[in-house]
Amino acid sequence: MTAQVEHKELANAIRALAIDAVEKAKSGHPGLPLGMADVATVLFSRFLKFDAANPSWPDRDRFILSAGHGSALLYALLYLTGAPSVTLDEIRHFRQLHSKTPGHPENFVTAGVETTTGPLGQGLATAVGFALAERLLNAEYGDGLVDHFTYVLASDGDLMEGISQEAIAFAGHLKLNRLIVLWDDNGISIDGPLSLSDSVDQAKRFESAGWHAVHVDGHDPDAIAAAIESARNADRPTLIAAKTVIGYGSPKKAGTSKAHGEPLGAEEILATKEALGWHHGPFEVPDGILKAWRTFGERGRAAREAWQKRLAGESEAVRTEFARRITGEPDTRRLHAAIDALKARFNGEKPAIATRKASELALEALVGEVPELLLGSADLTPSNNTRTKGLKEIAPGDYAGRYIHYGIREHGMAAAMNGILLHGGYRPAGGTFLVFSDYARPAIRLAALTGTPAIYVFTHDSIGLGEDGPTHQPVEHLAALRAIPNLRVLRPADAVETAEAWQIALGRTTGPTLLALTRQNLPTVRTEPAPQNLSATGAYELSPAEGVAVASLFASGSEVEIALKAQELLKEQGIAARVVSVPSLELFLEQPEDVRRAVVGNARIKVAIEAAVRFGWDAVIDSDGIFVGMSGFGASAPYKELYKYFGITPEAVVEKVIKRHNS
Amino acid sequence: MTAQVEHKELANAIRALAIDAVEKAKSGHPGLPLGMADVATVLFSRFLKFDAANPSWPDRDRFILSAGHGSALLYALLYLTGAPSVTLDEIRHFRQLHSKTPGHPENFVTAGVETTTGPLGQGLATAVGFALAERLLNAEYGDGLVDHFTYVLASDGDLMEGISQEAIAFAGHLKLNRLIVLWDDNGISIDGPLSLSDSVDQAKRFESAGWHAVHVDGHDPDAIAAAIESARNADRPTLIAAKTVIGYGSPKKAGTSKAHGEPLGAEEILATKEALGWHHGPFEVPDGILKAWRTFGERGRAAREAWQKRLAGESEAVRTEFARRITGEPDTRRLHAAIDALKARFNGEKPAIATRKASELALEALVGEVPELLLGSADLTPSNNTRTKGLKEIAPGDYAGRYIHYGIREHGMAAAMNGILLHGGYRPAGGTFLVFSDYARPAIRLAALTGTPAIYVFTHDSIGLGEDGPTHQPVEHLAALRAIPNLRVLRPADAVETAEAWQIALGRTTGPTLLALTRQNLPTVRTEPAPQNLSATGAYELSPAEGVAVASLFASGSEVEIALKAQELLKEQGIAARVVSVPSLELFLEQPEDVRRAVVGNARIKVAIEAAVRFGWDAVIDSDGIFVGMSGFGASAPYKELYKYFGITPEAVVEKVIKRHNS
């Protein structure tokens, strides 16, 4: 049946739906769907292994629209192939509230969308994580269960963003040959011809990063097919540079930046359809063409059924574990048992260690119990303490490992972690210095937005890192990260809270968790056993006042020690103070009002102590509260001197409390 | 005299000082100074045009240590060449509080340090700005006044970071042939051999970006010299891949990651000095060697004197303006006159326009009055409204323009802006969407840390951008940016406040300013003339209550309109409310307590309205204040629907105030 419908008609169906959707929404991007319809048609009609009715089948090929502004292309493909999520009605409601067709693809809204794209470069870098996860899982479960490709549609913008270099260097190094990037090489950007701002030889650039690269006419279906075929057979990832015309078919706008980001307009739509030879009304796809598309949507059904048979042939243990791994459900029983044992050990041993070291000990205890845990660092392994003893590393062509050397690529790491999680099979935890969270921020934000449970092990979390100085000392980062919705920032005060932080992070499935850990040693402040996870509500009274509290001292991480010493000194002066440990400010602020009130308490004087800026703490201590922390950038010196210099000491706390007490 | 001292002795002086400094500090990075001493010696002894006694001579060559962790190399060079800032005593106080020799180079601490480095990739990307500013200023003032090179010492880490791709693509495109990168090609990273994480052919990669690239033995002085010579004669920027041994000379650590980031230890220092043939005590540089180095420090004196003669030959007008431009002093008289006229016009015309459009009108009024203003956008020119009519663009080889197409490179743009400013001559203002501030954040932070007055024109500042959806809608960015010390975030409510924002931004010389501007139209709310800049204190009463205020409504930007409508509706219900416009929360929080108290006022009910997260607003409204804004990510829909859906409306404000009033 498909043979009866010409490629041109198939591609034009995408084009027509896309421009109609943009026109109806009075908003959107027609240029990419018009330009890349041929490439997408070849991919979906001849290569992509998928079953439109079962968009979450684990062994499907992944298609990632890195150039997310071209979302109308993706929605057209989902509708045409028969994905249940995108009906014609949804296409008609493109970019409208509550539709399944938002402005940029959102995987948490639309089944069949693999990841959320739009911020340029993210899709490509996330796809590297998908492709890596596929190889890792293949190494564990074999070709019978895991054997698929990751295809990416990328734009000039994707390749200009710096993250693309981190992604392609990492993918090229690891020889991720199941990764195929289809570049929409249209020579146009928003400002005008690409030549205004760029003259990179992209094929050569990708080759320098260990990729296979081919050029192809992006409007020649057989040439496109041959290029994809060669890519599938390459021993390395492939860039297919598809020379296209942006806004293909539009008489007045094709080949110009005018085609990129605004509706064509009613008149130009008619002219475009005329030029394309598409003689059908808005949102109208003739039955024959739709049927042909639907057969492509069903093409993968046999493959899926065969796969399910192979899965059924596995032992129940394998099937259960594979399902758990793919869906990302934590094995909470094993997790909690390991954490409880660890907390009991820390309660007893009372180690005086950095929380980065406590985290390493936690990982030692967890790595056997949480087989999906996939550790790594952006080239700070010995500083982040993310590698446990004997953990095998992943290497080019050898994916049977659980440690990833991401290289000095914080942004690429965070994006790859998103892709690994969205693919399914692993819980990646990646390390760098907290200050470099800035480098990874756009990918961290996407994790939060998409509800992807990445774990960031970010050490050297304050001026406590000492001599490296203000370029390396985070002061605003805790606030900046706490401000991201759905990201949990945990800053444990000691080894016990660090164990609790890992329990929270690994137990979470709905969003990312960031552990802010110290370089410097800290005493164990949680010396009493507590069966529950006290950190889980974000804040709790660690040390009550003797008598009625005059002051409440709130502190996080390394400053809890200071709060406890201040409490002692105040007691000597006859002033009763209580200490509240606040491992997670935003978890605390999410608690019901009565819980918050009880923890905040009624002491007249409220003090927050944190070696960072005040921003955000007024939610606990109010605008008249006392803050002991940083008001600007740090400095380079041994850390104990810095704490003194910046006045973050028990004595400074005491002085301020007494001054307020006497006022 | 210099001929009497062999290259080896000169280079060893750097090595010995560097390892002694690290050893005494018990902290630091010996590997790079040991490995790159030969390259640095060749550069400083034979090529670099500088006068150590006059580190701010405008026509000096710039040397940028992008691999800032190798700071001991730079301090050794400054001391050896006789820079007044770095005495031997300072070398002995490496990484100590108040020293001129902090852990990473800080230009605001140490004269002779061109920019602050350490976060990898930043130095290289900033250097592109230096090299561009040199060409721009050359186009304006000619070879007689501006004619110098920018040299960068970069590490593997610098090249792995994504920002490096944005930087090299941009520099290659613009053919910045005065830019020369010396890459410390030592094959080692912190995790171990570079081959653990990378296999990029860097020379090929740079060539693909339009660079000249050469390989050289980094320990062969004549080969290094020949490479630099070829670079100076190239018609494009050059990468010199200098193959070196990290920790060169250290018998036990050379060639391993052990040499990178920790002191060699007393015993290994002795062994290293023995191996190098350096038979002198700690911090000891024999007179002959020091004298030789000092002659290099004086080598540029004649060039500087000749330059000063040429400058003296220019007209007084040229000399005055050149000095003003280089030091970055705003011409406040012209600036204020232009702004006053603009405000008067807006007061009269009361335009209902987006603040991005008001910003464009401001730029139209300013571009003639502020000749140093250098506009640009990261490929969102028609959205950011950063290009004024007829403003000539900069193109490869043609630098007589004032508009920069930065390409889709937000991070590279922000770093280049830092370099342009640190070089001197221009006030760059660069645009992108506010949500993509995340991409540029590490460079924005460096601007704040170094006190570099970059101006960010970041539009589409809330859910008010509508259909593009949550990937493009900033909700946490205002908070995250306000948290950065020394960055001013301004979110004007209308055209008049936008003019005031530009006045603040262009009048500021001590740090960066960010303008958060709307896509959607807003009414003019500042209809009464005000001779002073009301935005300058961050917040002011825009509309007083009639009678004693029951409620204070605080709002910024597009939500001021909502606050004013709520005030009207409340008045109808007999509730007196006042409206405070808060164009800059952090400017307001910096005001003296009595000023803050007066603006916050005594109304029982405090409400903040902002289409963003609450984080940070408790500093004004306290924890019991009412917040009307976002609590999570946005959505894709026409913006008016979004405001309704998320409950950011006058009606929602009224309902909450009345409920509180009745409670």
Image (tube, coloured by chain):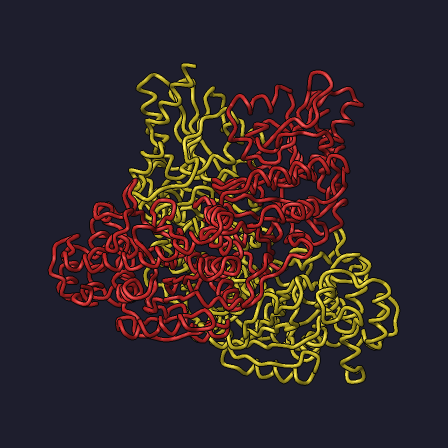
Chain colours: A red, B yellow
Q: Where is residue B396 drawn, in percent x and y?
A: 42, 74
Residue B229 shown left or right of residue A97 in the figure: right
For the point 16% across and 58% down, which residue is it? A269
Of B401 and B605, the residue lying toward us: B605
Residue A182 shown left or right of residue B605 in the figure: left
Instruction: Please say if A354 is above or below B327.
Output: above
How many marks can you see?
0
**Picture quarter with the N terminus of chain B:** bottom right
Q: Where is residue A565 drawn, in percent x and y?
A: 76, 31
Instruction: Please say if B377 is above or below A348.
Output: below
Instruction: Please say if A278 is above or below B587.
Output: below
Q: Is residue A549 visible?
A: yes
Residue B530 shown left or right of residue A37 in the figure: right
Q: Is residue B499 visible?
A: no
**Picture quarter with the C terminus of chain B:** top left
Q: Where is residue B404 drawn, in percent x and y?
A: 42, 64
